[in-house]
Image (spheres, rainbow, N blue to C red):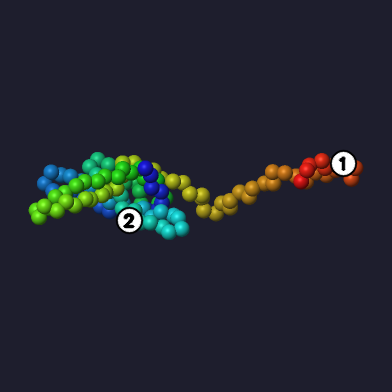
Amino acid sequence: MEVQGKIKMLGDTQTVGSGGFRKRELVVTTEEQYPQHILVEFVQDKTELLNSYKVGQQVKVSINLRGREWVNPQGETKYFNAIQGWRIEALQSEPAGVPPVAPTDAFEPAGDLNDDDHDDLPF
């Protein structure tokens, strides 16, 4: 799966627990009618993929959905979801100051029609 949009937030690398587990969070804002702010988590060696990116940059992030089950001390089962990134790439936007190219007309009007020519189309 992929998420495309603009980087809204780029967190610092955090080390969690005594085992040295590393994670880094990224928020991507989608560009659609109702923009969504998607929190994507990069873990372990994948945290380094974010080093060359900055807030405001257009990106495409490859993600996996992760889910897990947890039973609390009272015996209640809870479920948690996470969005985990494993690849990120910059999307090129149009350079500033360059006007978009206008589409050309694909058809030119016919100039060699005679009044004697008959149109035999049934509609």
The relative height of residue 78 versus residue 49 in the rendered view (above or below) is below
Residue 31: where, in percent of width, then height?
44, 55
Q: Amino acid at mark 1?
A: Asp
121 vs 66, nearest the viewer: 121
Q: Is residue 47 visible?
A: no
The total of numbered circles placed on residues is: 2
Dot 1 falls on a residue whose secondary structure is loop
Please tell me which residue is depicted at 24% across the width and 40% down the height of the picture.
45
Q: Amino acid at mark 2?
A: Met
Residue located beneath label 1 in the image: 117
Decide if residue 32 is on the left or right side of residue 81: right
Which residue is outermost to the left?
73
Decide if residue 102 is on the left or right side of residue 17: right
Please tell me which residue is depicted at 69% across the width and 46% down the height of the picture.
105
* Residue 118: quarter of image: top right
Please tell me which residue is depicted at 30% across the width and 49% down the height of the picture.
40
Residue located beneath label 2 in the image: 9
Can you say which quadrant of the picture contains the N terminus?
top left
